[in-house]
Image: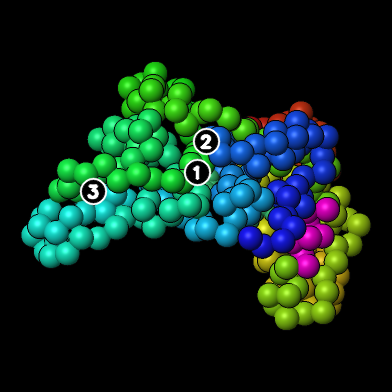
Amino acid sequence: MSPLPDTPARTLTWGAAAMKPVVAAVERVAATDATVLLTGESGVGKTALARALHRAGARRDRPFVVINCGALSPSLLEAELFGYEAGAFTGADARRCGRLEAAAGGTVLLDEVGELPLATQTRFLRVLQARTLRRVGGIDEVPLDVRFIAATHRDLPGLVEQGRFRADLYHRLAVFPIHLPPLRARRADIAPLAQRLLGDIAARLGCPGLDLDPEAARWLVGCDWPGNVRALINALERAAIMTDGETIGVDALIGPRRSRGGRPRSMAEVERDAIEHALAYTDGHRRQAAEILGIGLRTLYDKLKRYDLGG
Ligand SMILES: Nc1ncnc2c1ncn2[C@@H]1O[C@H](COP(=O)(O)OP(=O)(O)OP(=O)(O)O)[C@@H](O)[C@H]1O
Ligand SMILES: [Mg+2]
C-alpha cells in the first residue's frame, strides 16, 4: 500500500469555520467502509471529495471508478454497469465484466445519483443490500467487494416524495451523509483557495507565478459564487489569460472598464452603464452586482427604477 495517505483536508482547501464539522466527519469516515452520501450545490467539490475519501482510505491502491448516472443512456446502463454473459443479447459473444466488477477492492462513486432511472435504482438496491451482482443474462450472483460513495446536487428526500427516487435506496445510500456548504457560506476559504488555484493555473499556463492585487482579492471574497469553486476556477483562469504581468487586477476579473473617447458622458449615463455591466456580469444577480458596484442593495433597486432597468 502507498505510504502516508493524503488526508482529504490536506488535499482540499477547507479552513473556514463552517467547514470544521465537515472536516471532522470526513476524517472519521475516510478510514471506514461506510457508504457516504455527498450533497451540496453544483461546483462545491463533491466529486473532488469522493476522490479524496478514496485516496485516504484502505482501498487507495485499488480502483476508483466514477459512474456518472446522468450521462449513461438507460439502454446501455445495465450492461455497462453490471456486465453481461455470452449470449445475453445480439452481439454479446463473450462474457464481459461491468464497471462495478472492474472496481473490485476499490471505491465506486455513483455521481449525480439523483439522475438514476427507477429501473436501475432497483438493481442498485439489490447490489447494496446483498453486495453481489448478477450480470445481464446471467444467473449467478457474483460477490462484489467495493465501497460506495454517492453524490448529488439534488434534494433526494424531495425526489423520494415525488416518487422519482426509491426511499429504500435513499436510506441505503444515506448511511453517512455529508453536506458541503456553498462557497458564500465559507468566505474565509475564498482567498486561500484562490491562491492555491492560481498556483495550479500558473503551472498550467506555464507562467512563473500569479498573484491578486488587494482590490481583486476583495472583489473575489465579496462575490456570491453561485457556481462555487468551479466558477471561481473559471474566473481566475479567464483573468490569468487576460493579464500580462504576474498580478491580476480587478479589471481582469470583471472585464475592462469602458474606454474613453467621443463625447464625454453625464454621470447618469456612466452610472446606468456601470449598472448594466454589473448585472450582465453577474447574470442578473442583484446582490452580487450591488457588491461589485460598491452600493447597497436598496440603492441599486432605486437606481434600477430610476433608469428603467427592470427594478
Ligand atoms: N476545497 C477545494 N480545494 C481545492 N479544489 C477544490 C475544492 N473544492 C472543489 N475544488 C475543485 O473545484 C472543481 C469543482 O469541484 P467538483 O467537480 O468536485 O464539484 P461538484 O460538487 O462535484 O459539482 P457538480 O455537482 O457540478 O458535479 C474541481 O476542479 C475541484 O477539484
Ligand atoms: Mg461532481
Q: Which contiguous range is marked in magenta?
A: 192-199
Q: Residue at x 26, y 42 (%)?
A: 141
| Residue 36 counted in the magenta span | no
Element at label 1? strand
Q: Residues within 10 Å of mark 3 (few under 14, many from 20)?
A: many
Front residue (pair 227, 290): 227
Calculate the distance from the C-alpha at mark 2 to the C-alpha at mark 1: 7 Å
Residue 29, how many percent across, how many down? 65, 37
Principal SS element in the magenta part? Answer: helix
Number of numbered discs visible in the structure rendering = 3
Residue ID for mark 1: 147
Location of residue 187 (image quadrant): top right
Front residue (pair 146, 225): 146
Calculate the distance from the C-alpha at mark 2 to the C-alpha at mark 3: 23 Å
Element at label 2? loop
Extreme top residue here?
A: 161
Q: Residue at x 75, y 35 (%)?
A: 24
Residue 119, how many percent across, how many down? 25, 35
Residue ID for mark 3: 135
The answer to whether mark 3 is within 8 Å of ligand 2 is no
Location of residue 115 (image quadrant): top left
In contact (CB < 8 Å): disc 2 and disc 1: yes
Q: Residues within 10 Å of mark 2 (few under 14, many from 20)?
A: many
Give the vertical position of 235 relative to 293 (above or below). below
Residue ID for mark 2: 35
Q: Amino acid at mark 1?
A: Arg
In contact (CB < 8 Å): disc 1 and disc 3: no
Give the vertical position of 184 relative to 213 (above or below). above
Q: Residue at x 67, y 58 (%)?
A: 233
Tell me if residue 306 can be seen: no
